[in-house]
Structures are given as C-alpha cells and as structure tokens.
Image (cartoon, rainbow, N blue to C red):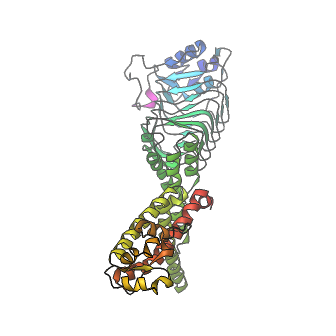
C-alpha cells in the first residue's frame, strides 16, 4: 500500500500494475472536486464502460482512466489531502468509480464526510477502529466486504442499495461500532456471507424489512438502537420477528438480547401491542431453549438412556405447562385472556347446571329443609326443587340462576349464595351426578385461572 503524503508524490508515482505514471483522469477530477467542496461525479464521462453505476470491469489491469480511482489515492484525500491538494470541510464524495486495490483506513481520524456511492470496489473496505467525524455513505456501491469493527461514526452510515458480494467470513462487520445518527439499510441488493452487528450501537435504525431477506447470516446479539423507521412495516411485530428468526439461525445457542432490545424500542416508541407480541415470542423461545438444554445426548450407556427418558418426561410436562400459560395469559403479557377463560368456564358449567335443574337433580343445601313436610310433599314432583320453590317456605329461599350458580362455583374469591343454597344430588339422575363431580374440576380450574390472571396483572409472572 502506498501512503501518499502529497499530490506531487502521486504525479511522480510509477504504477507497475496499471503501467501508468501519475494520476488517472478520474483522480484528477477527484482532486478538483474536493478542492471545490463538490462531489466527484464520474457517471457523466463518456467511454466504453459508461453507466451510472459501473458493473465489474472486464479487466482491472486495463481500466479506462475516466472512472478509475486507486484506493491509495482515495485514501490520501479521505485523510485530508495535503497543501498541494487540499479538501474542504465537506470532505470527499465520489460517485460512479471503479476503485482498485484495498482501501484500508483502519484506525484513522477522518473529520469530514466519506461518501463513496455507486462505485465498484475491487477489494474490501477496511475501517476498523476508525473515527469518522461526519457521515459515511456506501449507498449504491458494490464491494466484497466492509469491515468497521469498533469504528465510531458521529454522523450516519448509509448502506442503501448496497451490494455486498461476499467472499469473506464476515461480509459486513460492524461489531462494536458506534453510530451517532442513523444506520440506513434499505433497498439492499445483495449481502452474501455474514452481517455482524454484535454490540453495535446506533441512534436510529432506518430500514425496510425486505432488505434483511438479502442477508445470508445475521448476528444481532448486543445490537442496540433507540428508534426504528423506514418502510410502512417497520414496527410490524410479525415482520420484525422474522428478522430476529434469521439471527437465531445464525448462532448455535439462542440469544435473547435481540428480542428484549426490539421489545424495548417498540415500547418506547408507543407500540405497546407490538412490543407485547415480541415479549410473548421471547418467552416461547426461552421455554424451547430450556427444553433443548435439558435433553441428554445418548452415548449407548444405560445411565444416559435413563437420564434421557427422565429429561423427556420433564420436557413433556413443562411443554404442557408452557402451552397452558401461553394460551391462558400469554406468559403474563395478556392477562385479559384469563377473564375470557373464566367466562367460558362459567358458560360451560351453567349449561350443565341448567340441565340438572330441569331434570330435577337439585335440592336445597339445608338439612332442616330436606327434613320438612313441605319438601316431603314436593319430593314426589318431577322437579322437586322447582315445586318446593312455589311453596310458602320456598318462595323466601334463594332463587336458582344457572349462570350465577356457575359463577359461584368457578370464581373462588366471591360468594353469591347459590352454592350455599343449592346442591346437585348424586342419586336423583345422571345430570346431578355429573354436576356433583364437575364442581370440583371447575372449582380447581377457577382457582388456577384466577391466581394466574392476578399474577399476570401484578407482573409477578413476567418478573419470574
């Protein structure tokens, strides 16, 4: 790599690879543009390869000078140029170039804009540890890889319409990068290989979810952002969960941090319902991960086989409990579901109670009444309880209502007087017999549903 210190060095340099001495036509145009504080637009120069956005050249060693900028010359201007080739505070802006060689600006200080759009890079761009004092843009460009591990960008990083053709383990490597403004990742054309955003921090993520479909592998563990914007679906939980699912497939062990970050950001932006969907999905993932961790790998020994059977039994029980929590209260994030479950239980039991009443399988829950002459006379009727209710003594007794009776059985924290006044009989008919035993089941379910609903409302389950 040539580290040019002046324009005079570039003019005198004999480039053996390209068999030229001095700058190319495009490099001269770049020098003139940065001195005026203007972008260097190379897409309007006629020539055999003329296009707005250049494709891969037929030969890197025989490029027309109208578009050809060498990485070492570009680096010279990115780092501020020199007295005989000054740049303004607007920085360096190139559009439509073939950039040959490897552009390595790692661990440098670049105070002005770095705008390298609609260009085709021969080799990767390395900017790990670099401090950018303004904006960085690779929008529309095509390059093998971009490495900016630990870079600090005070402005925004634009990767819109970018094509990353891969060829490296990490195609887009932004681990631990700090981006003070927005990360723009929209209308991406290709991203072969792996995109690593682990522990990166951005103020704003501007994307469209479809662009993430272009990414082959995605690492998001520790990636933080304060807001989301971009396309019309940027806050859609289902689309965002598909984004996180791609990251799940790229790692061997489940990482919950991307889910908590997404839920936190959506909640802070006022999208509480979408945030809740993400948290519910996270709980399901955590339960699944716990089951995977519990499984025992068989090695042919009896001990491993027994441990595997035990683990499978525990996993089966925990799966059933997980589904119960998910359907009943959404893992604590949807407590109102418990109310609807209580309504269903009350409705189901009220049907059985009404049928038992119509069949004459109810009796007052008081021994003194059952031993009275009035009850003895009514006991011969098809529906003794109903007949007794028409007697002078019965008219002052608690009137039977099937819905109220069912609510009295199901909801343990209230006393409506129905179960204290009436009880199904086990020896008058099958409906009474079934209702007698069903009460215990419905009472137990009512306790469980009410307790879990209360715990969900108070947040105890979510904290656990």
For the C terminus, give its image quadrant. Answer: bottom right
Instruction: Name the residue nearer the viewer: 373 or 270.
Output: 373
Note whether 443 is above or below 196 in the view shown: below
Q: Residue at x 43, y 34 (%)?
A: 187
Q: Which residues are magenta?
A: 58-63
Q: Seen in the image, is 111 located left or right of residue 120?
A: right
Number of callouts in the render? Answer: 0
Note whether 37 is above or below 346 in the view shown: above
Query: Which residue is at the far front?
Result: 392
Q: Is residue 62 magenta?
A: yes
Q: Residue at x 50, y 64 (%)?
A: 325
**Residue 388 locus on image (x, y percent):** 39, 78
Instruction: Name the residue nearer the viewer: 49 or 405.
Output: 405
Instruction: Name the residue nearer the viewer: 433 or 301.
Output: 433
Q: Quadrant of residue 155?
A: top right
Q: Is residue 76 magenta?
A: no
Q: Residue at x 64, y 23 (%)?
A: 112
**Residue 399 locus on image (x, y percent):** 43, 69
For the N terminus, give its image quadrant. Answer: top right
Query: Can residue 291 be seen here?
Result: no
Q: Quadrant of residue 54?
A: top left
Query: Which residue is at the far left?
Result: 382
**Residue 428 locus on image (x, y percent):** 36, 85
Query: Can residue 396 be seen here?
Result: yes
Q: Quadrant of residue 356?
A: bottom left
Note whether 193 is above or below 251 in the view shown: above
Instruction: Name the residue nearer the viewer: 59 or 96.
Output: 96
Q: Seen in the image, is 136 located left or right of residue 340?
A: right
Q: Seen in the image, is 51 located left or right of residue 397?
A: left
**Residue 402 locus on image (x, y percent):** 40, 68
């Amino acid at each position: 790599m040539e580290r040019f210190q002046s324009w005079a060095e570039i003019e005198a340099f004999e480039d053996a690879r390209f068999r030229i001495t001095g700058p190319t036509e495009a490099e001269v145009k770049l020098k003139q543009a940065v001195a005026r504080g203007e972008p260097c637009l190379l897409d309007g120069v006629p020539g055999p390869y003329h296009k707005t956005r250049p494709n891969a050249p037929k030969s890197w060693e025989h490029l027309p000078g109208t578009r050809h900028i060498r990485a070492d010359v570009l680096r010279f201007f990115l780092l501020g140029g020199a007295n005989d080739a000054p740049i303004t505070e607007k920085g360096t802006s190139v559009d439509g170039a073939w950039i040959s060689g490897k552009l390595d600006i790692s661990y440098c200080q670049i105070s002005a804009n770095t705008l390298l759009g609609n260009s085709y890079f021969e080799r990767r761009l390395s900017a790990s540890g670099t401090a950018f004092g303004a904006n960085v843009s690779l929008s529309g460009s095509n390059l093998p890889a971009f490495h900016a591990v630990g870079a600090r960008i005070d402005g925004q990083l634009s990767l819109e319409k970018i094509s990353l053709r891969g060829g490296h383990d990490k195609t887009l490597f932004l681990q631990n990068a700090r981006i003070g403004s927005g990360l723009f990742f929209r209308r991406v054309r290709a991203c072969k290989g792996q995109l690593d955003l682990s522990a990166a921090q951005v103020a704003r993520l501007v994307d469209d979810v479809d662009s993430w479909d272009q990414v082959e592998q995605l690492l998001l563990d520790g990636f933080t952002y304060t807001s989301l914007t971009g396309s019309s679906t940027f806050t859609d939980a289902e689309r965002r969960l598909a984004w996180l699912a791609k990251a799940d497939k790229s790692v061997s062990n489940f990482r919950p941090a991307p889910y908590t970050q997404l839920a936190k950001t959506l909640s802070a932006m006022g999208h509480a319902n979408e945030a809740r969907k993400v948290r519910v999905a996270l709980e399901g993932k955590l339960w699944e991960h716990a089951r995977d961790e519990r499984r025992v790998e068989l090695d042919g020994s009896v001990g491993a086989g027994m441990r595997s059977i035990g683990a499978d039994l525990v996993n089966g029980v925990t799966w059933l409990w997980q589904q119960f929590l998910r359907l009943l209260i959404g893992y604590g994030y949807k407590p109102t579901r418990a109310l609807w479950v209580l309504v269903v239980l009350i409705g189901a039991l009220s049907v059985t109670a009404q049928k038992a009443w119509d069949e004459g399988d109810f009796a007052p829950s008081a021994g003194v009444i059952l031993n009275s002459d009035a009850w003895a006379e009514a006991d011969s009727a098809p529906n003794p309880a109903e007949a007794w209710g028409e007697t002078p003594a019965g008219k002052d007794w608690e009137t039977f209502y099937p819905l109220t009776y069912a609510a009295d059985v199901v909801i343990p924290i209230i006393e409506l007087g129905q179960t204290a006044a009436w009880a199904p009989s086990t020896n008058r008919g099958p409906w009474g017999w079934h209702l007698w035993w069903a009460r215990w089941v419905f009472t137990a379910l009512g306790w469980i549903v009410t307790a879990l609903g209360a715990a969900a409302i108070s947040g105890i389950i979510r904290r656990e």
